Image (tube, rainbow, N blue to C red):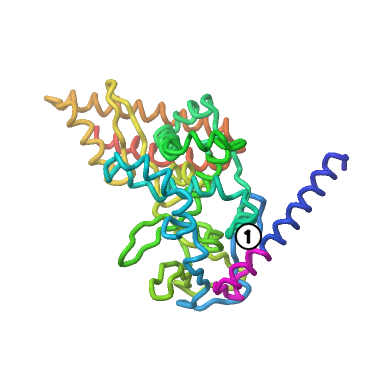
Amino acid sequence: MNIKNVLYIHLLYTLIICYSNNYEQLYNWLISNGAYISKKLIPKEQSLYNRYIVTGEKINQKEELLFIPNKLTISTLNDIVLDKCQKDFMNYYSSLTREEISSFDYDCLVYFLTIDIDNNQSFFKNYYNYLPEISKSDFPLYFTYEEKNILSKIELDTQISRQDIFLEKALMPVKNKIIKIENGLEKFKKNFIYVSTRNFGRRGSFYDDVNTLVPYLDLLNHSNDYNSWFYYDEKRDGFILYAIKNIEKNEEITISYGKFNNLYLYSMYGFTIKDNIYKSSIYIKIKNKKFVLFEKVKEGEIIKVINFFKPTNILEKNNIIFEIKNVLKNKLKEYEKFVGIFQNNLNIVNICDDLKWITKEYILLCEKMI
């Protein structure tokens, strides 16, 4: 083993020990401030980029696993957060419409993290210290223009551009302040990803969809076959996590981020699911007109494209179907090419496999319709 490998292993071991100590500090901070964490929950660190929770023993359905008081969460319903950013944001948003300020609480969280996360005296310091590192290779926001242009070939351009727009919109009210912070723009982007990947909607009779960072609860990963769920309890003034089924020992505790396809999961959360049951849509261009073909109601999607061009006879109709089929065949070749190019990037492979599956389904449908 060469000296570089020895140094790397030593550094990795040091970082793991550091993060383990940070977990103890996080746990003690939560418990001392009124949180409840079941003794059956065991934290795991797959890497510096990913933590998760497994069971130390069997858990029964409806069993409460976690309670995090509201005072430990980070949202605009928390006075500490609101006082820090309200003035800067409200001056900017005062002239905008209700629709334009709909992301106020989200943008405020990004700004608050940027000005508070390096504050050693922050009330939330123990939470900040246990946040995972962000793998820049997993988030299109960090990709170069050339990389983004390549990924536009596999339907990611819409999702990527949306994230770019959201980031710029969040930055706009406070850009003059952020650029005065050392590496401020880079820190703002990193915190934008933290908020994007780790926030929960606080729902209650008075507040709906308030973006909230919830320590410990945000360690839970997504699964389509999730085994636990959370809600905000107004009477107890905090977030509760409970089991929705019996969970066996050593099983990972998971929740659902939503019914999302891999394109969305990758652009928003930096991961994908192999053989995701929620398939992605594909985009085709026929006679310079762009169409979206959704995974469901496939025949209806083809008919919609045909009707757009108003064919007057069966020959014209079949010609349109032939063109759709040829476009789909070319897209299939593109997806297969990308699997070869990005064979070491599991996320891109999973996205391409999904797109290949639905494209093949549409090609077969076109053949049946002619």
Q: Nearer the viewer, residue 16 or 173?
A: 173
Q: Is residue 30 left or right of residue 229?
A: right
Label 1 sits on what residue type? Answer: Asn
Residue 23 lies, in percent from the top left, at 66, 62
Question: What is the quadrant of residue 328 in the picture?
Answer: top left
Tell me which residue sits at (60%, 75%) in the image: 40
- In which quadrant of the rendered image does the C terminus lie? top left
Left or right position of 249 against 95: right
Q: Residue at x 52, y 71 (%)?
A: 66
Asked if residue 330 is positioned above or below residue 265 in the image, the reply reads: above
Q: Is residue 155 visible?
A: no
x%, y% of residue 272?
A: 51, 47
In the rendered image, residue 214, in percent from the top left (x then y), is placed at 50, 61
Instruction: Give the farthest residue toward the left.
Output: 312
Examine the structure image and report whether residue 276 is included in the region drawn in magenta: no
Q: Which residues are magenta?
A: 24-44
The secondary structure type at the circle numbered 1 is helix
Q: Is residue 199 above or below residue 216?
A: above
- The x, y position of residue 295, in whole percent, is 34, 44
In the displayed structure, 303 sits above or below 229; it is: above
- For residue 43, side relative to residue 79 (left or right): right
Q: Which residue is mark 1?
A: 126
Which quadrant is the N terminus positioned in? top right
Residue at 56%, 42% in the rendered image = 190
Q: Nearer the viewer, residue 5 or 136?
A: 136
Q: Quadrant of residue 34?
A: bottom right
Q: Is residue 6 visible?
A: yes
Mark 1 neighbour density, 10 Å: few (under 14) some (14–19) many (20 or more): many
